Amino acid sequence: MSDSDEDAIISKTMAEIMKKRKSQESSPCPQDVVYADRDLLEHLVKECRVVVADFWAEWCGPCKMVAPLIEDVARKYSPRIAVAKVNVDENSDLALEYGIMSIPTIIVFDRGNEFRRFVGYYPGLARELFKTIESLL
């Protein structure tokens, strides 16, 4: 490999790093999972192209099984998307407004509108959620 080839690779790599850093700095979406109330969720849905909202409760066993998946989503996609957890015990009016009848319920918003809803924990949930997010990015 010649010096000019190495220089080209280094330049390309640096350009990619700078582009990624710039997009992260200018993103209105948080870098990690946020615990949301009505105001914050409305703000995220308005400002971020894609939002994943996990409606949950501390006493809910299946919610505890979904929690690592939500963390994985945030690790993989933040800040390109917003990831929010909405405690239904603390935000019952919001849960009612979104028609949450069972938890966990994960709602994926695209450009301010509900795109897809996942209810409960089941085999294949992670695959379906990641596939849905990928389709929106």
Image: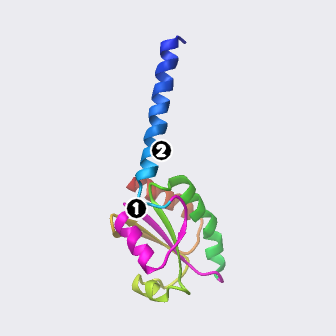
Residue lying at the far top of the rendered structure: 2
Residue 120 part of the magenta segment:
no
The circle drawn on residue 123 is none
Which residue is at 49% across, 19% downward? 7
Instruction: Say which amino acid is labelled 2.
Output: Arg
The answer to whether residue 62 is left or right of residue 21 is right
Judged from the image, the secondary structure of the residue bearing numbered disc 2 is helix
Tell me: residue 29, above or below residue 89.
above
Disc 2 target residue: 21
Q: Measuring 49% from the left and 23% from the top, which residue is drawn there?
A: 9
Q: Residues within 10 Å of mark 1 (few under 14, many from 20)?
A: many
- Image coordinates of residue 1 in percent, x first then y, are 55, 12
Percent position of residue 56, x then y: 56, 78
Which of the two discs, 2 and 1, sits closer to the camera?
2
Secondary structure beneath label 1:
strand
Please identify the quarter of the rendering in which residue 81 is found.
Answer: bottom left
Return the mark for residue 50.
1
The x and y percentages for residue 5 are 49, 16
Residue interval drawn in magenta? 31-59
Q: How is the image coloured?
A: rainbow
Q: Residues within 10 Å of mark 2 (few under 14, many from 20)?
A: few
